[in-house]
Image (spheres, rainbow, N blue to C red):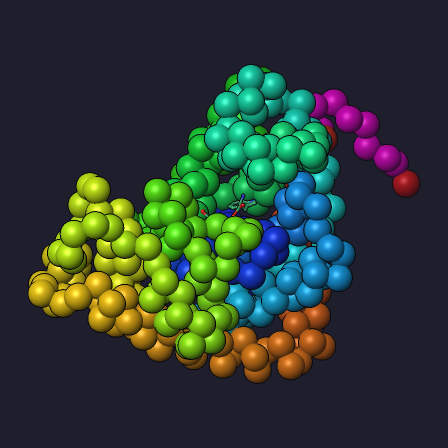
Amino acid sequence: MFNDKKVVFSGVQPSGNLTIGNYLGAIRNFGAFSEEYHCYYCVVDMHAITVRQVPAELRRRTYETLALYMACGLDPQKNTLFVQSHVPQHAELGWVLDCYTMFGELSRMTQFKDKSAKNADNINAGLFTYPALMAADILLYQTELVPVGQDQKQHLELARDIANRFNQVYGETFVVPDGYIPKEGAKICSLQDPTKKMSKSDPNENAVIRILDSKDDIIKKFKRAVTDSGNEIIHGEGKEGISNLLNIYSCFTGKTIEEAEKEFKGMGYGDFKLAVGETCADYLKPVREEFARLMADKAYLEQIMAQGAEDAYKNARRTMSKVRRKIGFTELKH
Ligand code: TYM
């Protein structure tokens, strides 16, 4: 079904219920590549265990993330949708790339620093080497383009460095991938601290809008969003709260920030927040409905998982056997 198209790869961790940050920064953009590229969209469960997970919840969220991909418009006949741990080459190449990734490089990763501060009692080696596994995800499929939000830019640059380093030592082995970071929506911020990104693992529920939140919850959370002193609805420095809400509004309506500012000129903060909440909730309604429909059919989700894993495996195996040869591993002769 895919011939020799160029490849797009991206992944989402099933480590929490997905937010409008995940949606606007990443998933919403995935579908645009389906015609022109062979697209792999992965549920990266192996990344999720770098932070302690409750097994039953991880399993449930893995199904849910797959269903959400589809509910957000990804057709499994036009995209390879699969679960990372179903394709063992991710772990295999991850280990190899660990050996081509420097301690100093990993130490500089801001996400590692953030996550180790948040999980001080569990700073495990996986959390540290996480970017090498992410590089493996991408390089395994000879990926050209990786659509992600702003927070993944540093990891992506490291993946490029690893690919270049490997290619220099062994000759052309990996395609060096480019990132695709959208102009709008690449950094959706927390509703409670708009200087930080909205994160699906934020313990403060008021800080995040989940794609599957009910309309009432969405409106309630927007109403509680922190704003700034003053009373003008304008985008700019010192107005991080209002800027974030305008940005979210603009992403959901397709209007520019200037158009949105004009529309809300003279309106109070309360009414503005209500309008943003209603727009967001209405926009996401069909996604919620489709998600519920898909989750009711577990057998279908399992069939998609199996089909995706089989397709991904075929291609992953090809790169892995090339890597094995290049680095000098012996082949088992049958
Ligand atoms: P994850 O699961 O944290 O996030 C999934 C995607 O959502 C984007 N994103 C955001 N975009 C805008 N505003 C936000 N507040 C926001 N929060 C998250 C992320 O940038 C990401 O695109 N390491 C990755 C998963 C991964 C991956 C990969 C991605 C593993 N292997 C290979 C691309 C290619 C992660 O933790 O994403």
Residue 140 falls inside the magenta stretch: no
Which residue is painted at 90% across and 41% down in the image? 334
Q: Position of residue 181 (x, y in %)?
A: 36, 46
295 lies above or below 135: below
What residue is at 69 percent from the left and 65 percent from the top?
Answer: 60
Q: Is residue 292 visible?
A: yes
Query: Quadrant of the image for the N terminus?
Result: bottom right
Q: Is residue 167 visible?
A: no
Q: Is residue 330 on the magenta stretch?
A: yes
Q: Nearer the viewer, residue 217 or 5?
A: 217
288 is higher (above) or lower (below) than 111:
below
Along the line of sight, the residue nearer the viewer: 232 or 86: 232
Q: Position of residue 331 (x, y in %)?
A: 81, 32
Q: Residue at x 58, y 38 (%)?
A: 118
Q: Position of residue 24 (x, y in %)?
A: 38, 58
Seen as rendered, the residue at the extreme front is: 229
Q: Main secondary structure of the magenta part?
A: loop
Q: Which residues are magenta?
A: 325-333
**Horizontal arrangement in the rendering, residue 246 relative to residue 177 (left or right):** left
Residue 253 or residue 305, whichever sits in front: 253
Q: Residue at x 58, y 70 (%)?
A: 67
Instruction: Give the quarter of the image for residue 112.
Output: top right
Residue 107 falls in which quadrant of the image? Answer: top right
Horizontal side of 238 relative to 136 (left or right) equals left
Q: How many marks?
A: 0
